Image (cartoon, rainbow, N blue to C red):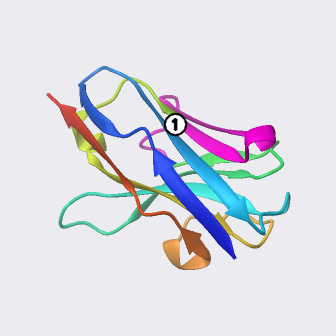
Amino acid sequence: QVQLVESGGGLVRAGGSLRLSCAASGRIFSSHVMGWFRQAPGKEREFVAATKYDGGVTYYAASVKGRFTISRDITKDTIYLQMNSLKSEDTAVYYCAARGHPLIKTTPADYDYWGQGTQVTVSS
C-alpha cells in the first residue's frame, strides 16, 4: 500500500506561482511512477505531469509544459509540482497519484494510488 498526501493549494492571482507537495509513505519503490492530475468542476480528471520516482524522466501535458515543473526529493519521500505563470484555466483540484509500474502513463485508470486532492484557484 502507498499513502499520498497533497498540500500547498490555495488562491493565487493569474500570473502567480504555487508549489504543490505530495508526501508519499508505505511501499513506494524507485520503479514507481508519480503523477499529478487535476479535475475542474464538470470536467474529467486530466493528466498534468509525471516522473519516475527515482527521477531522470519527466512528462508534461501540452497545456502546462514550460510553466509547470515536477520534481522529487527522495530523502523526504516527497513529489513537488511547481506551477508558474498560472492561468484561470488552471483552477482545479490537483491530485497526486502513484503507479506501480515503471512506464509513464497519462490515463487516471493506469494509476493505483491517489491522494485526497488539494484545491488550486487562480483568479483573473
Residue that badge 1 annotates: 65
**Type of amino acid under label 1:** Lys
Q: Residue 7's quadrant in the figure?
A: top left
**Side of 108 relative to 80 (left or right):** left
Question: Badge 1, how many Cα within 10 Å: few under 14, some, many 20+?
Answer: few
Q: Residue at x 56, y 64 (%)?
A: 106
Look at the image and give the residue range highlighted in magenta. Answer: 62-81
Q: Residue furthest top?
A: 15
Q: Nearer the viewer, residue 83 or 29?
A: 29
Above or below for 11 versus 46: above
Residue 48 in magenta stretch: no
Residue 107 image position (x, y, % from top left): 53, 71
Residue 102 image position (x, y, % from top left): 80, 66
Above or below for 65 versus 61: above
Q: Residue furthest left?
A: 124
Q: Nearer the viewer, residue 18 or 1?
A: 1
